Image (spheres, grey):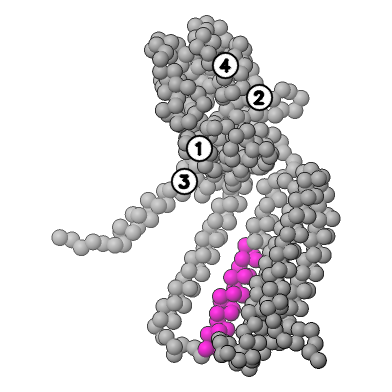
Amino acid sequence: MSRARPFPAAATLGILALSACTGPQSALDPAGEDAAEIAGLFWQMLAGAAVIWCLVLGGSVLASWRGRSLWQVATALKVILWAGAVFPTVVLAGLLIHGLRLMPGLRATESDLRIEVVGERFWWRVIYHRDGAPPVTSANEIRLPAGATVEFILSSPDVIHSFWIPPLGGKTDLIPGRTTRQVLRPTKPGVYRGACAEFCGASHALMALTAEVMTPDDFARWLQAEAGPAAVTAGPGPDAFLRHGCAACHTVRGTEANALVGPDLTHLGSRHTVGAGILANSPAAIARFVAHADTLKPEIRMPSYAMLPETELRLLADWLASLR
Amino acid sequence: MLRFGDKANLWFLIAPPTIWALHFLFCYVTAAVICAKSGLSADLRPIQIAIGAATVVAALLIVAAGWKAYRHWRPSSELPPYDDPSDDDREQFLGISTFLLSCLSLVGVVFVALPALFIADCR
């Protein structure tokens, strides 16, 4: 029987751990200036903590090894004073000043784009404000132009949520009765994942968000398209939507459906996910969500429509998926 | 006749943290009131000056208390712990405790005031 070899095992584990540093929802793989500052802070603090950890452990090993013969009491008291009180105070003061210096940038006053995000239970209402044109409403997905300074205006009608897209920046709470702000400066085009970072109810963990950073030209084209009405506004799909009462809660611009209780579905087919990040977007996923909403997302306000005949469900899902 | 502060007592011990607490309340309440009344774009210069002045006053009071305490402690005469039931040890114990609390309170006051230097508006 061969003996266990600790080094290759440790190396494998280390490489596995490093692979966790990347991905669409990693704060250690920044795609924006703010996240890069936070990641920098993390690595600096990790390095500093590692040095201090070695010093402290080295000190305790030395003390237990040499015992009372190491220092006179008066010297030991001096070591406690300098290493135990003065040094931590200086380190903390340095970190505090460094952190405070980063803060005004998180609240920059000049922005190229303003996006209002309302945290609902358990989805995100997203409103793009445009100069000289009406705002564009969407849900559960945020698209951003790379290189722009984007100001988010955050609020909540029900409970405290928290808005966090780790590759783009830090987290900011959405607090009922208050308006909070966050500024993000995305740099690297790509598709990222955000999440609600403050427990808000049974489906808190199912309240995700797709953030797609696009080139400025692609973004302008996309916003223009997003502002338009739905691609198909008449036919059996919209008829089924109105017949089954979906319009009591949802908006599909271009049809009679204009309610504001649930997410705007005008361009549902163009989104990456269904149900605020829980299912990859497809007609089958939409049908499954409509039929089993409260099983997929406990405590959601949308009732399940499992009683609908299969043909009706498919009609609805195919139409919604076609709204690109 | 004893002059003020010639002997260590409990009032000297609680003075530095009390000054720290009052300074903390002053900073946060002033900022909250001005921001609530003037909105997000409030001019923060007066708050910065007020917090700066409060910080200087609080720091001077704490340094004064710490200086008195240092004299009561007389660190060169004897090493801690000062746990004999004697007037001398009582004096030195209160002295060192007050001195250490003064150092902590001074750091606390400076840390509480630092954000006012960097924060540019009420958001």
Quarter the N terminus of chain B occupies: bottom right
Q: Which mark is residue A248?
A: 4
Magenta stretch: residue A86 in it?
yes
Q: Residue furthest bottom?
A: B77
Per the rendered image, the range of residues in magenta is: A73-95
Neighbourhood count class around disc 1 (C-alpha, 10 Å): few under 14, some 14–19, many 20 upward: some
Mark 2 and mark 1 lie on one chain; the one further toward the N terminus is: 2
**Circle 2 marks a residue in which chain?**
A
Q: Is residue A35 above or below residue A130?
A: below
Mark 1 and mark 3 lie on one chain; the one further toward the N terminus is: 3
Q: From mark 4 to mark 2, how far is it between C-alphas? A: 20 Å
B20 relative to A32 in the view: left or right: right
Q: Are marks 3 and 4 on the same chain?
A: yes
What residue sits right under mark 1 in the picture? A201
Which SS class for mark 3?
loop
Q: Amino acid at mark 3?
A: Thr
Q: Is residue B17 above or below residue A187?
A: below
**Foreground tag (2 vs 1):** 1
**Foreground tag (2 vs 3):** 2
Q: Amino acid at mark 4?
A: Ala
- Tell whether label 4 touches label 3 (CB within 8 Å): no
What residue sits right under mark 3 in the picture? A22
| Image x and y of residue B112, in percent | 70, 62
The picture quadrant where one finds residue B7 is bottom right
Q: Which mark is residue A235?
A: none
What residue sits right under mark 2 in the picture? A136
